[in-house]
């Protein structure tokens, strides 16, 4: 049971202590927990019977309208505020033109990967191999050493 549902049931139980007629209506299905929770703040001994009879088999929205009819809230006071000063438009950013002939291709590496099976067990780890130092490729892992054979 969630915390909100528990809070709802505690509120209904407290209302049922003051107004015992709520429990049989809840048991029969004439009222539901959400409806009782909405009715509880406005229920008095004077209006209890009439209000419970009017709320019988109503939706939560209809019960909210019934509560608003019984105990209307005052209108929200109207307010005026100064509008913010509009900002000046920013200067346009010059467009950067990218063309295939303007981009220089990176030279491929001059080393070739070595298959670990081709080397002995101890010799396949090359501690002199270059490190991959690109955080964009491996942002959450440690930098890795790649095994390359030097062209001879």
Image (cartoon, grey):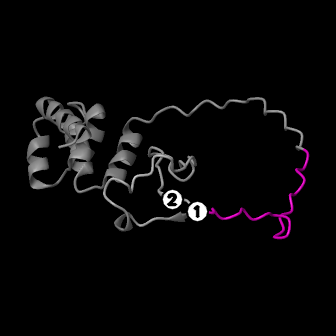
Question: Which tag, 1 or 2, sits closer to the chain's start?
Answer: 1
**In the displayed structure image, the side of residue 5 where residue 17 appears, left or right:** left
Percent of width and height locating residue 80: 73, 30
- Reply yes or no: does residue 30 show up in magenta: no
Q: Quadrant of the C terminus?
A: bottom right
Q: Which mark is residue 26?
A: none
**In the displayed structure image, the side of residue 27 where residue 71 appears, left or right:** right
Instruction: Identify the secondary structure beneath mark 2.
Output: strand
Q: Residue at x 66, y 65 (%)?
A: 108
Q: Circle 1: is it few (<14), some (14-19), or many (20+) Cα within 10 Å?
A: few
Query: Residue 30's quadrant in the figure?
Result: bottom left
Q: Residue furthest front?
A: 152
Q: Residue at x 51, y 31 (%)?
A: 74
**In the displayed structure image, the side of residue 62 where residue 134 appears, left or right:** right
Query: Residue 109's quadrant in the figure?
Result: bottom right
Is the C-beta separation of discs 1 and 2 under 8 Å? yes
Instruction: Identify the secondary structure beneath mark 1.
Output: loop
Percent of width and height locating residue 26: 13, 48
Residue stretch rendered in magenta on the structure: 91-110
Q: Circle 2: is it few (<14), some (14-19), or many (20+) Cα within 10 Å?
A: some
Q: Does 105 sit above or below residue 74? A: below
Using the numbered discs, state the Cα–Cα distance from disc 1 to disc 2 in whole angstroms.
6 Å
Q: Residue at x 74, y 29 (%)?
A: 81
Q: Residue furthest bottom?
A: 100
Q: Residue at x 71, y 63 (%)?
A: 107
Q: Majority secondary structure of the magenta segment? A: loop
Q: Which residue is mark 2?
A: 148
Q: Does 24 sit above or below residue 41? A: below
Q: Which residue is mark 1?
A: 111
- Reply yes or no: does residue 108 show up in magenta: yes
Percent of width and height locating residue 11: 21, 33
């Amino acid at each position: 049971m969630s915390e909100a549902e528990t809070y709802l049931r505690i509120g209904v139980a407290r209302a049922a202590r003051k107004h015992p007629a709520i429990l049989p209506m809840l048991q029969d299905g004439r009222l539901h927990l959400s409806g009782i929770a909405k009715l509880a703040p406005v229920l008095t001994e004077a209006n209890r019977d009439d209000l419970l009879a009017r709320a019988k088999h109503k939706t939560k929205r209809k019960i909210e309208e019934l509560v608003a009819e019984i105990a209307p809230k005052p209108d929200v006071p109207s307010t005026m505020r100064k509008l913010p000063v509009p900002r000046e438009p920013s200067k346009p950013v010059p467009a950067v033109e990218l063309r295939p002939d303007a981009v220089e291709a990176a030279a491929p590496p001059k080393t070739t990967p070595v298959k670990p099976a081709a080397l002995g067990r101890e010799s396949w780890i090359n501690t002199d191999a270059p490190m991959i130092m690109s955080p964009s490729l491996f942002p959450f892992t440690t930098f890795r050493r790649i095994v390359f054979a030097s062209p001879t």
